[in-house]
Structures are given as structure tokens and as C-alpha cells.
Image (spheres, coloured by chain):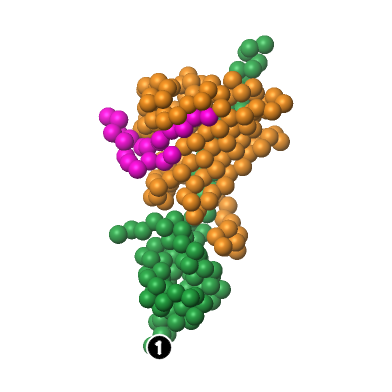
């Protein structure tokens, strides 16, 4: 992060939940759109050099987004997101699962809960992602992002402190 | 059956066992002395931890000693760190995009 805005990422291993919080210097309408409109989503959702390509998206309760992460070589990883609850500019929830290119989901997926709030022109997004299994999270990591990431290992003490 | 590491550390007794054997290799009896549960219960926890490859066993004479697979524990952190990086990259891109959109609106 190049600025002083909040970004934190925590994992509660015991509840199998990942928490991501991020502040943006933009009003809530714009940030909401960035998360809920495919033409904006596709511009930032995939970490470069990957690209996000949404095939279908209808943002409504019961609706879905079917999209692919595409590598520079053209390799496609499909995912399916089903919207289970929407409160405009404040919260939406979805079920997220990997899928094949025929839209068959690879269950179980993960449950996402995204909260949006604005204060003094800063919009905060709080995301919680509940995963059923480690396998699935590992798979997320293996979706082709491994290259280029240098992982810094936390010490065992820190890990144990987090576990106790 | 490949077990889930989260399952391994979801249980408070198993977390306590991990903390104990992180300091030194211990026999099942020595581990069990730290808990109010039965020796069988502790053995079952040790079996789960072994199946998750979080602990390793070493035979010394007639005793089996359990110790922690430190590399495996680090692995958990390693992939969590990668997941964090994905979000960081994603949000950097969104920050840039938002500033472009705002500029174009003016």
C-alpha cells in the first residue's frame, strides 16, 4: 500500500475465516460500484498479469457472477459467485465457488460477507471469507498467483501465540 | 485420507498439545499428564495431528517421542501470506482505478 489508508488482513484459523479490511479515498457509491459492476470489477479483480473476464453477471439476490481469471498464456480459472443478500451501498453476501467452464461449481465453496461504510470521504470495506476447508484455501493460492510472491515467514513463536 | 490442518488446530486440546511439544519432544504419557482427559483421548488427538503431518514420531528405545513439524507449521503461514499478497495487489489496482475514475469525472 502506497498510502496511509488502512489495509489489514487477518486469519482466524480456528474459525477458518479470513478478514480483510481496506479504506479507499472515494465515496461509497463509487466503491460500491467497483465491487458490484462487472465493467469496473474486471479492471481490478485479478492480480496482474492475470485478467478477470466476467461472462455473465446479474447483481441481484439469487443472481450470480460467472467469471474467469485468465493468465497471460490464456489459461482460464472459472469461478461462480451467487448473491444471497444485498443491502445497497452497505452490505452484500455471496457464495463463492470454483467452477468448470460449463458453470458446474466445485462445492463446498466459501461464504463472503462484504460491508461498506463511509466517514469523512473515506470508504471502508470489511470483508469476511469463511472457508470450509484448508484444501480449498490452498487451491485459491495455487490458482497461478504463486509466481512472483516472496513469502515472508512468520516465526513459530508468533504462530503459536496466535494459536493459544 | 488427507486431513485438514484447520481441523487439527480447531480443537483447544490439540492446540495445547502443539504448544507443549513445540518446546520439546515428549512421550504420549508425559503429554497426557498435562490434561484432564483420558490417555485414549490424548492418543486420538496425537493421531489426528500425525495424520495432518503436524507432528512427527521418533522411537527412542521403548518410548515414542512426539515433536512438532516446524516446517509444516511455517507452511500454513507461508500460504496465508500469499493470500494476503493477492488482496494487496488487488487493492493497489483498485486504488489506482478509483483515482482514474475520479479524475475523469472532474
Residue A20 placed where, x, y %? 56, 40
* Magenta stretch: includes residue A103: yes
**Stretch in magenta:** A91-111
* Residue beneath disc 1: B61
A11 up-or-down from A90: above or below: below
Chain B: give its colour: green
Residue at the (60%, 38%) spot, across then down: A21
**Which residue reaches farthest top?**
B106
* Lateral position of residue A53 relative to residue A3, left or right: left
Compare residues B58 and A149 and report the one nearer the observer.
B58
Judging by colour alone, the chain drawn in orange in this rendered image is A
Which part of the image, by quadrant, shows the C terminus of chain B?
A: top right
Residue A76 placed where, x, y %? 36, 32
Residue at the (57%, 47%) spot, across then down: A10
Residue at the (46%, 32%) spot, across then down: A93
Residue at the (56%, 62%) spot, across then down: A164
Residue A66 visible somewhere in the drawing: yes
Image mark 1: chain: B
A68 up-or-down from A21: above or below: above
A105 up-or-down from B44: above or below: above
Amino acid at each position: 500500500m502506497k498510502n496511509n489508508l488502512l489495509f489489514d488482513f487477518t486469519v482466524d484459523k480456528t474459525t477458518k475465516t479470513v478478514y480483510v479490511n481496506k479504506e479507499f479515498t472515494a465515496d461509497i457509491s463509487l466503491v460500491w460500484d467497483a465491487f458490484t459492476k462487472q465493467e469496473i470489477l474486471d479492471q481490478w479483480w485479478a492480480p496482474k498479469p492475470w485478467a478477470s473476464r466476467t461472462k455473465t453477471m446479474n447483481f441481484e439476490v439469487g443472481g450470480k457472477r460467472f467469471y474467469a481469471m485468465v493468465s497471460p498464456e490464456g489459461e482460464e480459472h472459472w469461478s461462480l459467485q451467487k448473491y444471497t443478500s444485498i443491502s445497497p451501498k452497505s452490505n452484500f453476501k455471496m457464495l463463492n465457488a470454483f467452477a468448470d467452464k460449463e458453470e458446474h461449481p466445485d462445492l463446498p465453496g466459501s461464504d463472503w460477507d462484504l460491508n461498506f461504510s463511509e466517514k469523512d470521504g473515506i470508504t471502508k470495506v470489511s470483508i469476511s471469507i469463511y472457508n470450509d476447508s484448508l484444501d480449498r484455501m490452498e487451491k485459491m493460492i495455487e490458482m497461478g498467483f504463486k509466481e512472483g510472491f516472496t513469502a515472508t515467514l512468520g516465526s513459530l513463536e508468533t504462530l503459536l501465540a496466535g494459536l493459544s | 485420507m488427507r486431513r485438514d490442518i484447520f481441523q487439527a488446530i480447531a480443537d483447544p486440546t490439540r492446540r495445547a498439545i502443539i504448544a507443549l511439544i513445540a518446546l520439546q519432544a515428549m512421550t504420549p504419557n508425559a503429554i497426557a499428564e498435562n490434561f484432564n482427559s483420558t490417555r485414549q483421548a490424548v492418543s486420538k488427538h496425537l493421531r489426528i495431528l500425525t495424520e495432518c503431518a503436524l507432528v512427527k514420531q521418533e522411537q527412542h528405545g521403548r518410548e515414542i517421542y512426539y515433536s512438532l513439524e516446524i516446517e509444516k507449521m511455517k507452511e500454513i503461514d507461508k500460504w496465508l501470506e500469499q493470500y494476503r499478497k493477492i488482496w494487496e495487489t488487488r487493492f493497489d489496482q483498485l486504488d489506482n482505478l478509483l483515482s482514474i475514475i475520479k479524475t475523469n469525472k472532474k
